[in-house]
């Protein structure tokens, strides 16, 4: 029996493990999401079910989030940060998420929603590079409440009640263009 246990321990210690999804940073409880140069989506993008009536997280943008697009007008495109699909539909039909871009020397944050297939966005303010910022999206009947820097912003919602069959939305770069460089965003779920 001892030899059997010893063999199992040796086998376990010599095999490598790979994480499904994004790898947690073991120095803290943030997860680092990486979008490689030339890509839209994060590495190892694994969507998970979302069943809550709210989403709270903290985000830390570093200097990799300062970028310049190839086509100047694409600098206005809103990158997606974090959110969820809604109303038992695909996210480009109904969803709520925070967005961001680097424009006019500042990292700008947005409320970004799809309501029955129609996209709407509203600028919420700016975020500082290397500063932890809190974000919250809450369902309230026919609206989403985005809380950023303690200020609530109401955005329309297509359905009422819970999210139904929904999934979590992870960071995504663009609009039209892919990431011009490697982008790293750290997020701590609350």
Image (cartoon, rainbow, N blue to C red):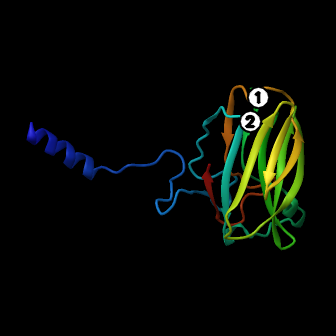
How many residues crowd around disc 2 within 10 Å: few (fewer than 14), some, or many (20 or more)?
many
Residue 85: mark: 2
Residue beneath the point at 69% across and 43% down:
55
* 7 sits left or right of 140 in the view: left
Disc 2 element: strand
Vertical placement of 126 versus 157: above or below? Answer: below
Point out the residue furthest to the front here. Answer: 150
Question: Residue 30 is drawn in which quadrant?
Answer: bottom right
Query: On the picture, is 159 further left or further right than 131?
Result: right
Q: Nearer the viewer, residue 43 or 131?
A: 131
Asked which quadrant contains residue 51, the reply is top right
The residue located at (84%, 30%) in the rendering is 141
Query: To which residue does mark 1 refer?
Result: 89
- Name the residue nearer the viewer: 54 or 60: 54
Q: Position of residue 3 (x, y in %)?
A: 9, 42
Task: Identify the residue at horizontal 67%, vertical 64% (top origin).
Answer: 132
Q: How many marks?
A: 2
Secondary structure beneath dot 1 equals loop
The quarter of the image holding the N terminus is: top left
Up/down of 14 relative to 8, above or below: below
Mark 1: few, some, or many residues within 10 Å (few <14, many ≥20)? some
Seen in the picture, residue 117 relative to 23 is either above or below; the reply is above
Disc 1 vs disc 2: Cβ atoms closer than 8 Å?
Answer: yes
Mark 1–mark 2 Cα distance, whole angstroms, equals 7 Å
């Amino acid at each position: 029996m001892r030899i059997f246990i010893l063999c199992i321990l040796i086998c376990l210690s010599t095999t490598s493990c790979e994480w499904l999804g994004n790898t947690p940073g073991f120095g803290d409880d943030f997860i680092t999401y990486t979008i490689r140069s030339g890509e839209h989506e994060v590495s190892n993008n694994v969507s998970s079910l979302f069943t809550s009536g709210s989403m709270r997280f903290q985000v830390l943008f570093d200097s990799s989030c300062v970028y310049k697009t190839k086509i100047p007008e694409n600098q206005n495109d809103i990158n997606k940060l974090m959110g969820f699909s809604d109303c038992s539909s695909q996210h480009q039909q109904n969803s709520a998420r925070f967005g961001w871009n680097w424009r006019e020397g500042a990292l700008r944050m947005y409320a970004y929603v799809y309501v029955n297939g129609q996209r709407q966005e509203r600028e919420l303010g700016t975020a500082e590079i290397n500063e932890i910022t809190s974000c919250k999206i809450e369902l309230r009947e026919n609206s989403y409440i985005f809380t950023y820097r303690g200020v609530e912003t109401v955005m329309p919602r297509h359905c009422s009640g819970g999210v139904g069959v929904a999934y979590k939305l992870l960071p995504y770069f663009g609009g039209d263009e892919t990431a011009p460089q490697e982008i790293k965003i750290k997020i701590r779920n609350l």
